[in-house]
Image (cartoon, rainbow, N blue to C red):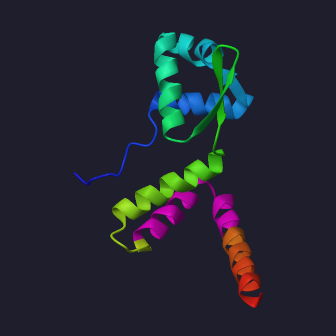
Amino acid sequence: MLPVKRPYLGELETAVMEHLWHCDSDDAKSVHQKVGTKREISLNTIQSTLERLFRKKLLNREKVAYAYVYSAAIERGELMSRLINDVVNTLSDGKSDYMLSAFVDFAARSDESSLDKLERLIALRRAENSTDKQK
C-alpha cells in the first residue's frame, strides 16, 4: 500500500464543509440540525468535527455569546486544488505524465464539453503566463 500524506476529509467533515459553503456561517447546534440529525449522530460528534476542521485550518470561528460560529476558511476550489496537489505529489514520483493522462481521461469520461473546457483553460493559462513573462 502506498503511503498517503493524510486522509484530508472524512465523509462527515465533507458534509459539514458543504453545509458551511452553502450557508456561509453557523453554530454547532444549527450544523447538528442540518447535518447531524439526518445521520443520527450526536451534537458532540458535530462539535468534534467542527473542532477538527478548525484545527486543519479549514474553518474560521468567532465566539458569539456562549457559542462559536463557524465559517469556511477556504473556498471549495482552493480545497480541491490542495487535495489534488497532495495526491499528485504522493503518487507521481516526480513525474506529471500519469496525472495529466488521468485528468484527461477523467474529462473525457465526463462529457465531450469537458475536453473543450480543458482546452480553453489551457489556452487561457498560456495567455496569462505569456502576459506575466512580458511584465
Image location of residue 30, percent across then percent down: 65, 15
Residue 107: within the magenta? yes
| Residue beneath the point at 74% across and 77% down | 128
Q: Residue at x 52, y 57 (%)?
A: 106
Q: Where is residue 24 drawn, in percent x and y?
A: 73, 31
Residue 19 placement (x, y as % from top left):
64, 28
| Nearer to the camera, 64 or 39 | 64
Provide the residue span drawn in magenta: 98-118
Q: In the displayed structure, would residue 109 be above or below residue 100?
A: above
Q: Nearer the viewer, residue 103 or 8?
A: 8
Image-quadrant location for residue 107: bottom right
Q: Is residue 133 above or below residue 97?
A: below
- On the question of residue 65 being in view, the answer is yes
Name the residue nearer the viewer: 93 or 117. 93
Kindly identify the residue that appears in the image at 22 percent across and 51 percent down. 1
Q: Main secondary structure of the magenta part?
A: helix
Q: Residue 91 vs residue 59: left or right?
A: left
Foreground: 76 or 135? Answer: 135
Q: Can residue 109 be seen at all in this image of the molecule?
A: no
Number of disc labels: 0
Q: Is residue 109 magenta?
A: yes
Whether residue 51 is situated above or below residue 125 in the rendered picture: above
* Residue located farthest toward the bottom when viewing the structure as drawn: 134
The image quadrant where one finds the C terminus is bottom right
- Residue 29: x and y, percent? 62, 12
